[in-house]
Amino acid sequence: MGVNRRAEWDSTSRESGLEEAHPPNWIPPVQPDQPPSDRIIPLGELFVGFMLIGLLGFGGIAASANYVIVERNRWMTQKEFVELFGISSILPGGNILNASVMVGDRHHGILGSAVCLFSLLLMPLIILLIIATTYDHFSYLPDVQAAIAGGASAVAGLIIGTGLKMARSVDRTVAAAIFGLATFLAIGIFRLPLASVVLTIVPLSVATALYMLRRNQSGRRP
């Protein structure tokens, strides 16, 4: 890729008379023509990426999904990932399962959804069968029980850390803070049923966001 960019630059510079403007080994910086979300991701890359998510997602898969999709492969921006997970969270089923179906469908339709879902579940299913068989024989040992308790604490930290990272991409408005705090209090403190909280807060937050968007658009009109 570097050789091709250099050849293109040499051709352009000779035509424009700028061949001496930079050192001989200088390679012009890459300027992406499209944002990450507009690139069609190959099926093989989707398969490897979601298989990696499944392998890294011990106890909490949101952190590994954020790492693979946003930081490692740059399939989405952080804001797009937050929006994807927001939609996935209000749909029935697991968050990352819903997200894998939507990401696959975005790039390759039904085939892409099937590939992403299959690769996501492949390795965790194999590992789960091995661990379940092993745990059945050694679960009575105090060291095993202590290890499970320690793992649960680490998972809680991963979830909190990922939540804080995702929160940085959310628009910092009073309405967003109110709905976020209300959701935390309802589920984390008062232990209200998740379905009731989702069916109440999500419609209110969506209606508020639409109202604020329309108000801002009307305010910018001449």
Image (cartoon, rainbow, N blue to C red):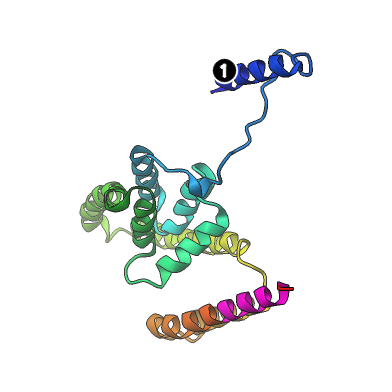
Note whether residue 219 is visible.
yes
Name the residue type under label 1.
Val
Assess whether residue 217 is covered by the magenta stretch. yes
In the depicted structure, whether residue 70 falls above or below residue 3: below
Residue 151 shown left or right of residue 94 in the figure: right
Assess whether residue 117 is covered by the magenta stretch. no
Q: Position of residue 45 (x, y in %)?
A: 38, 39
Q: Position of residue 149 (x, y in %)?
A: 41, 63
Residue 27 shown left or right of residue 191 in the figure: right
Note whether residue 156 is visible.
no
What segment is highlighted magenta in the picture?
208-220
Q: Residue at x 37, y 47 (%)?
A: 50
Nearer to us in this view, 15 or 155: 15
Q: Position of residue 78 (x, y in %)?
A: 56, 55
Q: Residue at x 42, y 43 (%)?
A: 40
Nearer to us in this view, 99 or 165: 99
In the depicted structure, whether residue 29 falls above or below residue 217: above
Residue under pointer 1: 3
Q: Position of residue 184 (x, y in %)?
A: 54, 78
For label 1, the crowd category at 10 Å Cα-Cα, with few meaning under 14, some 14 to 19 and many 20 or more, is few
